[in-house]
Amino acid sequence: MAMRQACSHRERQRGVTLIEQIMVVAILGVLAAIAVPSLAPLLQRNQVQVAQIEFIAALQHTRGSAALSGKPTLFCPSRDGVQCSGETRWESGWLIGHDPARKGQPDAAPLRSQAAYAGITILGDSGRRLVRFQSDGSASGMTNTWRFCRHDRPDEALVVVIANSGRVRGAKASAEQAASCAAAQ
């Protein structure tokens, strides 16, 4: 009987030894060291995709604001988040604001703004320094294409295109668009 109690006592003592725990941590460390370098390109590609998605959302927000308010609403590059900068490069940030007087600047505080995108180039078509949506949601005369890229990965460039009707879409950049974006670094 004493033997049976001793065996059952040993069977109940289960756990992980310190050596086993150290081995697991060492293996996890090795696997993490192998995985981290391969994640860097994924994170960089994701950064460009996030910028493209935010840009599309901002354009759609601008269009919706114009339709709801009945006022012309602009989307423009901005360095300070308060005034339009009048540039064709957008990576320093952008803003959205009502522009009923059509001055090319918001008539009051911006409705929304975005700070700079680090490591990304965002180029608009030359000559298009802003997008103005009308109260009917159109962006007449504002056909524009923006190119999004990283200088070290031009093959992963993306574009955002806006039509005169106000329709906004995103796509993968053509080889020519990607090359022009990478050359602008």
Image (cartoon, rainbow, N blue to C red):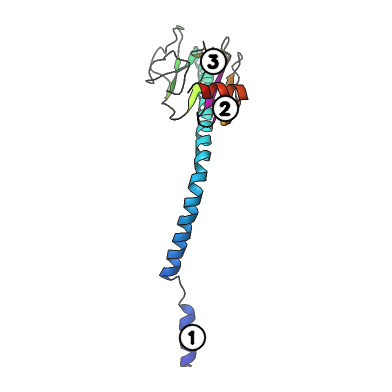
Q: Does the magenta stretch include residue 155?
A: no
Q: What element carries label 1?
A: helix
The mark that comes first in sequence, 2 or 1, is: 1
* Nearer to us in this view, 134 or 173: 173
Q: Residue at 52% across / 45% down in the picture?
A: 38
Which region shows up in magenta?
144-153
Residue 126 point in image, percent of width and height: 52, 13
Residue 10, above or below 177 = below
Q: Is residue 105 left or right of residue 55?
A: left
Q: Which mark is residue 158?
A: 2
Tell me whether circle 1 and circle 3 mark residues in contact (CB < 8 Å). Answer: no
In which image quadrant can residue 176 be found?
Answer: top right
Q: What residue type is labelled 3?
A: Asp
Vertical position of residue 73 compared to residue 148: above or below: above
Q: Earlier in the sequence, mark 3 or mark 2?
A: 3
Residue at image coords 57%, 27%: 158
Instruction: Quickly name the residue at label 3.
Output: 125
Q: Which of marks 1 and 3 is in front?
A: 3
Check the image and name the residue furthest to the bottom. Answer: 1
Q: Mark 1 points at which residue?
A: 7
Q: Calculate the distance from the C-alpha at mark 3 to the C-alpha at mark 2.
A: 14 Å
Is residue 149 covered in magenta?
yes
